[in-house]
Amino acid sequence: MARVAIIGSCITRDLWPTRGDSPGGPMYVSRTSLASLLASPLLGFTPTETLPGELRRHQHRALVADLQKTALAQLVAFQPTHLIFDFIDERFDLLSAGGTLLTHSWELEASGYLAQPAFAGARPVPRLSVACESLWRAAAEEFAALIRATPLHKARLILHSARWATESRGESGRRRPIRDVEILTGRPADTGAHNALLARYEAAFEAFMPPLERVEAPDWRVADEAHQWGLSPFHYVPAYYEEIWRQLEALGALRPPTPASALPSAPAA
């Protein structure tokens, strides 16, 4: 059986029938950025013993991993046969705090951790800024070196190429433009600018990394208005997931495809 690891978002994680905290599914590293993933731990940060705010256990676990930088060691120890990347979570701004970089996700805001002294003087690094892109490219190059120097070089590397949908589809089949997109509440986002950034990220990543397989379904990058987790540029119609799974299966992801009626049912992106 394949041992699949994902560094990415729910658009890839949704493909597997095991959900949330259930055992047996892929190793899933989410709510992070390559720039944050390879940074040093946030000194002085202390996670609470109980779940903070509105967070679920898997959300809190991903957040703490981003702050304490534990995911890379776990990834190497997991020894995946397939390592899948998607960059949809590379939409959040970064935070510079305590001499390190963090992902300014919804989970971080909802946790209340920003009030801890460890975050004093934190400065935002806007995702679409030149500084953020420079930090990301440096991290991507470092990650490629890490792949080559660890057992991860044995894994089949796969880039799941995705974009923000610009149209949604309802039950009638009619398509309509997606308007007023926000990354975090009250913070509008420019879909075109983020899609252009994703294209640059992917091009740089492919240049730095060992050989990568690519899976993509550009004809099905349409948001589903009936999606279980609500309308979002990253919550696609079922045919999208079916096509991506078909391609992943051909690359050796050895689980049977999830029926369209069961897609998607993982935590929202």
Image: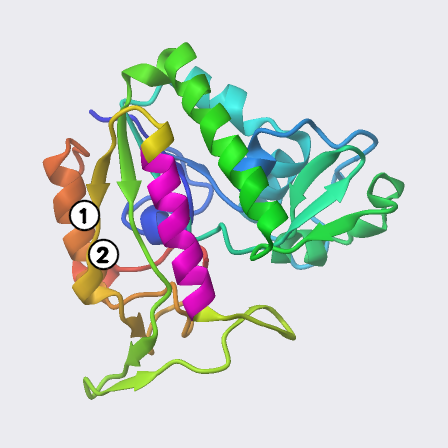
Q: Residue at x 57, y 29 (%)?
A: 38
Magenta-colored span: 192-206
Relative depth, front residue between 221 and 63: 221
User: Which quarter of the rendered picture does the N terminus lie within?
Assistant: top left
Q: Residue at x 30, y 24 (%)?
A: 210
Q: Position of residue 225 (x, y in %)?
A: 33, 78
Give the residue displayed 51% in from the left and 56% down from the top.
Answer: 91
Q: Residues within 10 Å of mark 1 (few under 14, many from 20)?
A: many
* Residue 24 placement, left or right of 119: left
Task: Check the image and name the residue furthest to the front.
Answer: 130
Question: In the image, is 118 to the left or to the right of 49?
Answer: right
Q: Nearer the viewer, residue 141 or 6?
A: 141
Q: Which residue is mark 1?
A: 245
Three-letter amino acid code at disc 1?
Trp
C-alpha separation, residue under disc 1 versus residue under disc 2: 6 Å
Main SS, magenta region, reads helix
| Residue 151 in the figure: left or right of residue 140 | left
Reply above or below: 66 against 114.
above
What's under tag 2, amino acid-wise? Tyr
Query: What residue is disc 2 on?
Result: 241
- Say if residue 115 shows up in the picture: yes
